[in-house]
Image (cartoon, helix red, strand yellow):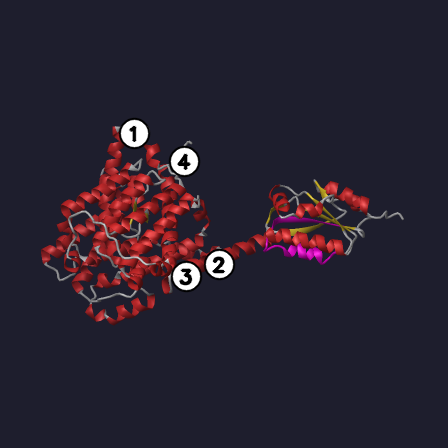
Amino acid sequence: MKLDTTLFRPKLLDSLSGYDRAALVRDMGAGVTVGVVALPLAMAFAIASGLKPEAGLFTAIIAGFLIAALGGSRVQIGGPAGAFIVIVYGILERYGPANLILATAMSGAVLFLMGLFRLGTLIRFIPVAVVIGFTNGIAVLIMLSQIKDFLGLKITAMPADFFGMLHTLSAHLHTLNLAALLVALGSLSLLVGWMRLGRRLEHTRYQSLSTIPGSIIALLFATLATAGLSLPVDTIGSKFGGIPASLPHLQWPEFSWDSARFLFMPTMTLALLGAIESLLCARIADGLADDRHNPNQELMAQGIANFVTPFFGGMPATGTIARTVTNVKSGARTPVAGMVHALTLLAVVLVAAPLANHIPLAALAAILMFVAWNMGEWREFLHLRQYRMPYRLTLLAVFFLTVVFDLTVAVEVGLIAACLTFIYRISSLSRSEAVGAIDHPVLAGHEDHIQAWRLYGALFFGAVKLVEAIEDQLHKPVLVLDLKNLIYVDSSGADALMNLIRTCRKKQIHLIVCGLMHQPLDIARRSGLIEHLEGRLEPDLAAGLTHALGLAPDPAR
């Protein structure tokens, strides 16, 4: 029995064909660059999520390596992402660290099964309005959560909900730390200034300077200023006791089925968000690297990474757009670059971990503020007037629900609203049209005995009113129904046609159906509808009208 290698085939296997030294040098250079970029982000995402900084680093190392080695994209970089901050913080506050491990591992299993059952392409059907709505909502919550460290406020525990955050922040504004605020403002100014300078240097002889990440520049200057001036601000060392210069060890918390039951919705939210983010990132990478990713393989790799990582002190991981773009622009061509990025971070943890003790939290808050601002698609709010009302309502509803209530509720409402809008739009495109003697002269003189109708579009549960309207107008002895232009019929549509057949029998009306083919013909066979149309089926409208003329009385009599 031959093994089906297409079921699980990482891109790495295809990328190694013809791999040479020049490609290795490019990938190593890109991997080291992305590793440097990921260093402050990984720590910042973990701290913002309510975890220790090493949780972000361990995630970037373990998940980053597994996603690159097993994924379906050549250049995608995996690791902790800003999109998970709000969800992880909420899970930690409500259920505790042990259940975060369980929820992350369960989401990994869900992601793997989604890829195994070839559901990767379904993620593309999530409406853009829903994606933009929750992305902008998450960005607002990230910025709001970073105000504490940005201002240096003395807050012991930050609530996870929107109104709780606002109340806590306003109640502690009197504890503002001027030194922390200056460090944060200086870091943010460096980030913005370096980004603008990099754009000007891109096509000059100094363009190599533009590849240096602004986050590293800001972090370096902020750390030197804090240590050199002995500024009274919180640092990684003072808040978390530093970062361990060792490999993570296996953590196996106590599990219970009660916990798994309560964690169902958080688990599904993590899985859905991880799938959306990773496949969105992979599509962006395809455009930059002129490649095409395998969405199902990518989901399986994300699943494995999220199942393994939490047991070694990590947090949820997904594809990261900013690091992936940096990877491609730095010359990466294969998954080897992503693996090198993970090994670079591992080397930093093992060699330079003590240096992280002096990193000020205010600088990390500034970096996250910058990331959140760039993460949001704010111009979409200005462009809302160009779209129809359903699109506007869906986007705004998801945005406000994400910010005020919960991401899970927001996505659920957004998907329901999008489905209802889609059903309405498709049902409005489905229509019926009466066939008259003007288009078909053979009907001349027979209008009192034959009525003919054409159906267009999809005959599904949202459009069965078309058949019901015809059923209400049965006042002639012969009915011809042309279904040639129907592209789809569901079980409700088949049931409506069956009711029409029964009504025609009761009223002793001859029913002739024309043009039944493709999917409508298939469901007619499977539902048993075809058996009730025996002797009444015709290949097209012309044949159906000829048949009807033979059943109608002669108008000359």
* Res. 6 mark: 4
Secondary structure at badge 1 equals loop
- Name the mark nearer the viewer: 2 or 4: 4
Secondary structure at badge 3 equals helix
Task: Tell me what residue is drawn at x 56 percent, y 56 percent.
Answer: 424
- Give how far apart the Cα atoms at labels 1 and 3 are: 47 Å
Magenta stretch?
451-474
Residue for badge 2: 417
Front residue of 36 and 464: 464
- Give how far apart the Cα atoms at labels 1 and 4 are: 21 Å
Question: What is the three-letter code of the residue carrying label 2?
Answer: Ala
Mark positioned earlier in the residue sequence (1 or 3) = 1
| Picture quarter with the N terminus | top left
Residue for badge 1: 19
- Name the mark nearer the viewer: 1 or 4: 4
Question: What is the three-letter code of the residue carrying label 1?
Answer: Tyr
Front residue of 98 and 10: 98
The reply, left or right, for residue 538 in relation to residue 292 is right
> At which x and y percent is residue 128?
44, 52
Residue for badge 3: 409
Check whether the beta carbons of the residues at disc 1 and disc 4 lie within 8 A of each other.
no
- Name the mark nearer the viewer: 3 or 2: 3
Mark positioned earlier in the residue sequence (1 or 4) = 4
| In this view, 277 is above or below 263 | above
Magenta includes 459?
Answer: yes
- Name the mark nearer the viewer: 4 or 3: 4
Question: What is the three-letter code of the residue carrying label 4?
Answer: Thr
Mark positioned earlier in the residue sequence (2 or 4) = 4
> At which x and y percent is residue 80?
29, 50
